[in-house]
Amino acid sequence: MRGRARRGLPWVLALLGAGLVAHGAWIPAKAALAQRLLERAWLSTRGGEDAVRPWPWADTWPVARLQAPGRGWSVVVLEGATGRTLAFAPGHLAGSAPPGAPGNSVVAGHRDTHFAVLRELSRGEELRVEMRDGSVRRYRVIEAKVVHESDTRVLAPTAGATLTLITCYPFDTPVPGGPLRYAVVAEERAAPLRDGPGSNDTLPGGARLARHREDGSRGRSAEFGERGGGSPARGEGAAEVLRGRAGRARGELRRAGG
């Protein structure tokens, strides 16, 4: 009996390995297929329809198209940053400014599919947000930084039009779901770029070098250089709203990698 079990073990391991490989291949394939369906829904949205569902059972809809023209990268963004939404496309974080509007628009995505490109973005690169009316807003990347999932400052409202893209970090970790997040911050091209100290010290993902430190149970992170043109939250009311949704936002962003 033991001999049979030993002889059968390699087959079991082989089947498990094949299953893991197939699952790993299915994730990017599903993401790519979803973008084709989302393109159709986006074209309908551009045509004047409202809240176009990309498939009958969808509980979300396209809100913008995000592009990095220098890299030939283009993705449709869905409303909501839930785990189910992020499996198909980047998701706009509910409660943040709409993509392309004044304020801080936060979009989350998976590090190994739609937002894998974030590690390649560098300071000064152009990002574009295509709106439902066909207009295009242009942004420039001003910084990239690593933050702890408990640090909600990256979600804070801004006076000008800001685009914040968030994914899990590190990019190459075999185990998803860690506590760190990689954030790329861009502002409208009208906002001037500002040089900060240490701009030549970079991490592989393009972020300026900094040390991440833990303080008890709450993680804190050092920002990598100055945030050009950023501004604090608008008054105590905005701060209260931000704190009120911070728990839900952390839960959503915790699923942003994978």
Image: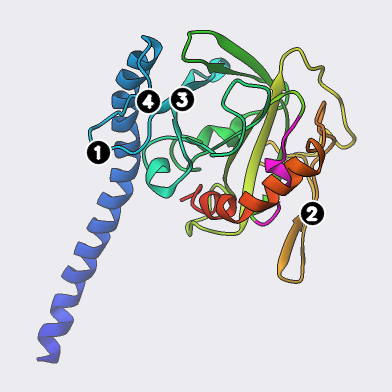
Query: Which numbered disc flags the more N-terminal residue, 2 or 4?
Result: 4
3D distance between C-alphas at marks 2 and 4: 42 Å
Verify whether residue 156 appears in magenta: yes
Q: CA distance from mark 1 to mark 2?
A: 44 Å
Element class at badge 4: loop
Nearer mark to the viewer, of 2 and 3: 3
Q: Residues within 10 Å of mark 3 (few under 14, many from 20)?
A: many
Q: Which quadrant would the N terminus be assigned to in this image?
A: bottom left
Q: Is residue 19 left or right of residue 193?
A: left
Q: Residue at x 37, y 25 (%)?
A: 51
Q: What residue is pinned by disc 4?
A: 51
Q: Is residue 187 above or below residue 31?
A: above
Q: Earlier in the sequence, mark 3 or mark 1?
A: 1
Residue indicated by mark 3: 63
In percent of width and height, residue 22 lies at 25, 50
Q: Nearer the viewer, mark 1 or mark 2?
A: 1
| Magenta span of residues | 150-158
Amino acid, disc 1: Trp
Report helix, strand or loop for mark 3: strand
User: Whole-Å distance between the Cαs marked 3 and 4?
Assistant: 8 Å
Per the image, the residue denoted by label 1 is: 57
Disc 3 residue type (three-letter): Val
Of labels 1 and 2, earlier in sequence is 1
Res. 211 mark: 2
Q: Is residue 44 left or right of residue 2?
A: right
The spot of residue 233 in percent (x, y) is: 78, 38
Q: Residue 28, how many percent across, how many down?
A: 35, 39
Dot 2 lies on which element? loop
| Residue 138 visible in the displayed image | yes
Question: x, y (%) of residue 155?
Answer: 67, 42
